[in-house]
Amino acid sequence: MSRAWSLVRRPTGLPTAGNFELIDLPAVPLKEGEFRVRNTWLSVDPYMRARMEEIKYAPCFQIGEPMYGSAVGEVIETRNAAFKVGDRVYHSEGWREEAIVDPSLGAKEGVAPFVLPDLGVEEQVWLHNLGIPGGTGYFALFRTAGAKAGDIMFVSAAAGAVGSAVVQMGKARGMTVIGSAGGPEKCAFVKSLGADAVIDYKAGPVLESLREAAPEGIDVYFDNVAGDHLDAALACARPHARFAMCGMIGVYNENQPLELRNSRRIIQARIRLEGMYFGEFADELPVFYEDMGGMIARGEVRSVETVSEGIETMPEAFIGLFSGRNTGKMLVKL
Ligand code: NAP
């Protein structure tokens, strides 16, 4: 018998434990082409909050059905010659102990199932710096924002999964990096990743702190938060600054429209704001694996994780993302 988390009611505002239920999955025989995985690591990600609502731009979790998301584990049974018993694999049937994976369905969450290549990293790194968070940081920074050596780059939620990758990649590629995070410990962590300056957004207004940290303004803003961070970045943007609009965790649990005091700066400074969606870069993943694999091998990018033990802890690990319980990537270990 294997267990999975299911959504029992859609949340309004911040989700609570009552939105989730741990259900038993029936034992189902494999069909031709499928394989069965015993999951070892499961990912919780802020974007899953959007999957809990009935949204139009992406599929949502169905009430009473197992939820899903990135996971790694070991193949324990197979009817697919490309996936052998004992292989360590990445797939998208997370939020559960055992998964049946059908690779013919392709990329359910932006990445198709694959056997983990031997890049000399621990397997959970495929859920962080070599997974969706690292890939999001990589493509949003270098492609969406076109960030390059010499740029002054500001990144919010800099102590998190995406943010910690962005800080390190920015430094590895010759940028001046300013990161924001909540509280002195998180800020010390961001500094330890190499950031030139850090902003504790819980200690005072972001705009004042950003003006102090970047007196000459910023060329690139990597947005994970929106709200006051986005407003401050607009105010400090240099002419032709580029904004990678990656996430808006500051407003995911709000129903209010996003208000920006400094929106006029978009025209005054000819700022380019571009939304980024990781799934659109699926064809370019080999380039990412090679480039990011190199940065990891050279010690330029390291993975820091906050680990929650046991499937029972998964909802609280997920909810903890919204109060900053994690430093680096939040993971659940089975
Ligand atoms: P994460 O940063 O590891 O975890 C979330 C962090 O956000 C928390 O640790 C917390 O850090 C911070 N936070 C929470 N509420 C906040 C608030 N109200 N104001 C400011 N900071 C707040 O999560 P992640 O997986 O790396 O994701 C980061 C962002 O990227 C999210 O917005 C996510 O949706 C987005 N994303 C987008 C894509 C895409 O394709 N566009 C793909 C993946 C992720 P503090 O303790 O510092 O507050």
Image (spheres, rainbow, N blue to C red):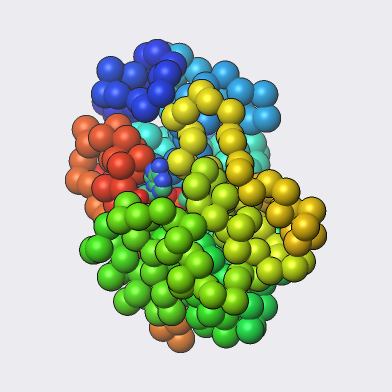
Indicate the quadrant where residue 80 lies.
Answer: top right
Q: Nearer the viewer, residue 66 or 306?
A: 306
Residue at the (47%, 28%) spot, across then down: 254
Q: Position of residue 124 (x, y in %)?
A: 37, 58
Left or right for 267, reference 185: right
Residue drawn at x 57%, y 50% as measured from the top left: 231
Total number of numbered labels? 0
Residue 153 % position (x, y): 57, 70
Which of the 4 image quadrants contains residue 105?
A: top right
Does any portion of residue 205 appear in the rendered image?
yes
Q: In the picture shown, does residue 204 fall above or below 52? A: below
Could you say which is closer to the camera, residue 143 or residue 12? 12
Indicate left or right for 258 with 123 as reference.
right
Give residue 207's position: percent from left, percent from top: 49, 57
Q: Decide if residue 90 is in sight here.
A: no
Above or below — where is 266 with respect to 191?
above
At x 30% / y 42%, what residue is drawn? 323
Query: Quadrant location of residue 104?
Result: top right
Q: 80 or 313, which is in the foreground?
A: 313
Q: Report x, y in % for residue 174.
A: 57, 85
Question: Where the C terminus falls, by quadrant?
Answer: top left
Q: Residue visible at 59% across and 76% down?
A: 216
Question: Would residue 266 be found to the left or right of residue 334 on screen?
Answer: right
